[in-house]
Image (cartoon, rainbow, N blue to C red):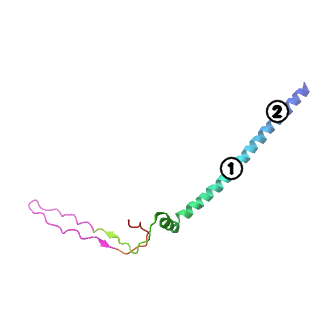
Amino acid sequence: MLVAGVFASLFAIVAVRVVLAQDQAEIDRLSASIEAQQAVRQDLRLMVAELEAPAQVVASARQRLGMVTPAAVTYLTPPPPPPAPAATAPNSAPTATAPNSAPTATAPNSAPTAPAR
């Protein structure tokens, strides 16, 4: 009886060690997968940073979209809003306001624009 108890105990210990070894192998496999995925993630982050660089955006706009840098760019600025009418007496006639002036132009810029079609 004692021999059977010792044999059962040794068998149980071996079975537990086998399960632990299998679990450790799974942990090692998952750790390697995590490291590989982190390397891929780092490569993708580098690629995104390179593609977001202003020079790359301009180059891509020229190559893929056919955009060109204009010789000059004119910005239009709307005139300021007319002043609010002052409170008038009930018997006074409304006064006419001057019409808005035309928009004004500002300095050129070197941003790419789409080609004329």
Question: Nearest the camera: 92 or 33?
Answer: 33
In primary-sequence order, the first of circles 2 and 1 is 2
Compare residues 47 and 26 and report the one nearer the observer. 47
- Residue 8 x, y percent position in the rendering: 85, 29
Rendered image: mark on residue 33: 1
Mark 2 element type: helix
Query: Which dot, 2 or 1, sits closer to the camera?
Result: 1
The stretch drawn in magenta includes residue 53: no
Q: Which residue is mark 2?
A: 12
For the stretch drawn in magenta, the main secondary structure is loop
The image position of residue 38, as x and y in percent, is 65, 54
Rendered residue at 48%/65% (across/down): 61
Q: Tell me which segment is drawn in magenta.
A: 80-105
Type of amino acid at the residue the image marks with label 2: Ala
Cα–Cα gap, marks 2 and 1: 32 Å
| Front in this rendered view, residue 62 or 78 | 62
Residue 26 position in % (x across, y down): 73, 43
Q: Residue at x 62, y 59 (%)?
A: 43
- Residue 22: which numbered mark, if any? none
